[in-house]
Image (cartoon, rainbow, N blue to C red):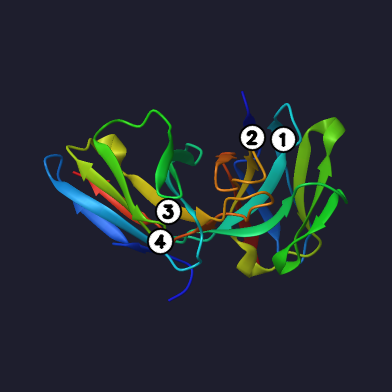
Amino acid sequence: AQSVTQPDIHITVSEGASLELRCNYSYGATPYLFWYVQSPGQGLQLLLKYFSGDTLVQGIKGFEAEFKRSQSSFNLRKPSVHWSDAAEYFCAVALTGGSQGNLIFGKGTKLSVKP
Amino acid sequence: ETGVTQTPRHLVMGMTNKKSLKCEQHLGHNAMYWYKQSAKKPLELMFVYNFKEQTENNSVPSRFSPECPNSSHLFLHLHTLQPEDSALYLCASSQVRRGGTEAFFGQGTRLTVV
């Protein structure tokens, strides 16, 4: 069965420090991978997505993610975290590229930012 | 308005009540979705509607009843809910086609069952 694992439930980083959030997926075919962010009391906003091609994808707000097929991973990174990045981050996989709303999500990683 | 709008934002209901959640998308998409977000559990896909037809029901109890009268509106009718149904209910939309678009989410309805 398809699944997404985010091994870190909660991460705290200092403002200005680099960030890496981990995501591993289990899916037999070529995955369609996404990172979403959710601020408190809000819905989900797409940060970036990967379907094919260059394995390093750039997203909004200075985020990037790297797809590594050999490790079944799609980790999210940011070189310098801002206080406004404090939120919950969700990795997800879509079963088809044509229906990208049919998603399997990880449990999320909550990011706290220290001043 | 733009994007995906959900009403109400907050709802408290008793276990014997009947209520409905509403979702409206202004993006011209042809697919709409209901997700449930509970504490300490992953977001769970509940229902999928493509071109107003329900194409997926992920073993959701019958006390949740979706309705999609057109491609812009989606409802979730609730009756005789249980306290464990308390959660954030998120609506999303996307364009389903070869190549498709990503899902756009509403801000959710925070439901509390008492």
x and y percent of residue B105 in the render?
A: 49, 58
Q: What type is the residue that disc 4 sits on?
A: Ser
Disc assigned to residue A24 = 1
At numbered mark 2, what does the secondary structure look like: helix, strand or loop?
strand
Q: What type is the residue that disc 3 sits on?
A: Cys
**CA–CA distance between discs 3 and 4?**
12 Å
Q: Are marks 2 and 1 in contact (CB under 8 Å)?
A: yes
At numbered mark 3, what does the secondary structure look like: helix, strand or loop?
strand
**CA–CA distance between discs 2 and 4?**
30 Å
Q: Is residue A110 left or right of residue B77?
A: right
> Residue at (76%, 47%) from the top-left corner?
A51
Q: Is residue A77 left or right of residue B15?
A: right
The mark closer to the camera, 3 or 4, is 4
Q: Is residue B20 left or right of residue A50?
A: left
The residue sitting at the left extreme is B16
Q: Are marks 2 and 4 in contact (CB under 8 Å)?
A: no
In the rendered image, is residue B38 in sight? no
x and y percent of residue A104 in the render?
A: 57, 38
Question: Which residue in the protein does label 3 denote?
Answer: B91
Question: Which residue in the protein does label 2 denote?
Answer: A4
The mark closer to the camera, 4 or 1, is 4
